[in-house]
Image: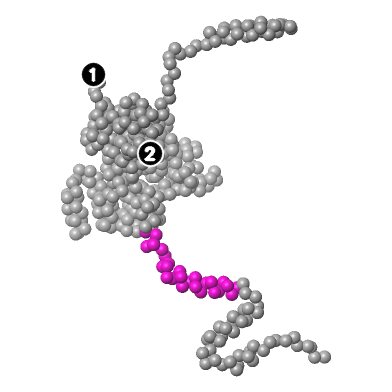
Amino acid sequence: MAAERGMAAEALVGQVVLPGDLLLLPAHYDEDAEGERLRLSAGAAPQGRLLCGPGLRRSGAGLLVTKCGLLRHRPGGGGAYWVDSQQKRYVPVKGDHVIGIVTAKAGDVFRLDVGGSEPASLSYLAFEGATKRNRPNVQVGDVIYGQFVVANKDMEPEMVCIDSSGKSSGMGIIGQDGFLFKVSLGLIRKLLAPKCEIIKELSQLYPFELVLGMNGRIWVKAGTVQQTLIIVNILEACEYMTAEQRKEALAKLSGN
Amino acid sequence: FMQRGLDSQTKKQLEEEEKKIISEEHWYLDVPDLKEKESCIIEERSFLRCEDLVYGRMSFKGFNPEIEKLMVQMNSKCKEEEIEEDDKMEADVSDEEMARRYETLVGTIGKKFLRKRDQRVLKDDDEDEDDEEGNSDTIPSKRAKKMFLKPQD
């Protein structure tokens, strides 16, 4: 089979790409053009390095697509390309904030289920203000919000509930009551986008608290059980509703 | 094997022979050296670095005030430019109040460091200002210097 000639990456932004497509990058990323790069060129050469995000791999001539989805591009900070794909199964990634459920206590370490292939481990010292004598009060079945510190395909993922400066900054055990449910990963990313209309519209309804984990899990807590269930239903249905349908549904609710 | 009085030449020859034997035994790749390419592409598996995602914990309409404070803090780390503009709006005390406060503050703190005599002068000045009618007669009586009173025998 003849190798397919690659297409320019810029031309395919916003279009569907399939695994095996080769994306060519503009000349100033090419290693052969080193000599040209050193000269002060008047052209807009980006300062930083190009970020090759999820769904793409670096291969000799350019970027190789490994997942099917839409190609996205961000021009700021050296530029970034990634593939916006949809999936339900989560693969642990370092630095991601996720919701985990404690399944077992093994000595000094808790085992958490995060929806990946292996349970993640969380040390009891990885909480804010925890010492050997002052242990956190974590039981089996608790819901915990933390981030990954180690997450690669060769090792068991490890989580912590403090950030690099030692503060908890919102991570740790999530309190009593509330409802935990699962959605697809694409919806989570949509909800976490800087200006998300869904969240804005929901926040107009009534006071509630929301925790979104990158592993597809959402925890909701509102004043009454009924309100909580309403929010859960809206978030689940958001994936397949268009903007108008959603606004209609919310209008009905706020009318009630 | 070290023999005394061995000529330097023969020594060198022996060393070279040793080196040859050693280097022939070493394996080496018969391939030209690959230049290490400086790559300008970083591979990243997390969506967090690509898209600007907000913090995952949120609270609305005051359901959980600590989390609302956290939200402002976290999201301000990402958008520092906006914060600089909003600084004036978010100030607890307005500029005018600050100016007024400092006006009086400088006076009160300045008084603390005056010596006693200066303090008295200052006090008199204040009293003069307060008394508009100018009861200058009564004031000198208050002002009578307290001389040292000799104890009467």
| Residue bearing mark 2 | A47
- The secondary structure making up most of the magenta span is helix
Which label's residue is closer to the chain start, 2 or 1? 1
Q: Quadrant of residue A57?
A: top left
Question: Does any portion of residue A88 appear in the rendered image?
Answer: no
Q: Magenta span has B91?
A: yes
Rendered-image quadrant of the C terminus of chain B: bottom right
Three-letter amino acid code of the residue under disc 1: Ala
Chain letter for mark 2: A
Rendered-image quadrant of the N terminus of chain B: top right
Chain letter for mark 1: A
* Residues shaded magenta: B86-112
Q: Quadrant of residue A7?
A: top left
Residue sitting at x 27%, y 49%:
A196
Residue at the extreme right: B153
Residue sitting at x 39%, y 59%:
B87
Three-letter amino acid code of the residue under disc 2: Gln
**Mark identifier at residue A2:** 1
User: From mark 2 to mark 1, how far is it between C-alphas?
Assistant: 36 Å
Question: Does any portion of residue A248 appear in the rendered image?
Answer: yes
Q: How many marks on residues?
A: 2
Residue sitting at x 31%, y 28%:
A62
Element assignment for label 1: loop
Q: Where residue A100 sits: x, y (%)?
A: 38, 41
Q: Magenta span has A226?
A: no
Q: Assess disc 1: are there few (<14), some (14-19) or many (≥20) residues with their C-alpha within 10 Å of its C-alpha.
A: few
Residue sitting at x 38%, y 36%:
A40
Tell whether B13 sits left or right of B36.
right
Q: Assess disc 2: are there few (<14), some (14-19) or many (≥20) residues with their C-alpha within 10 Å of its C-alpha.
A: few
Q: Quadrant of residue A152?
A: top left
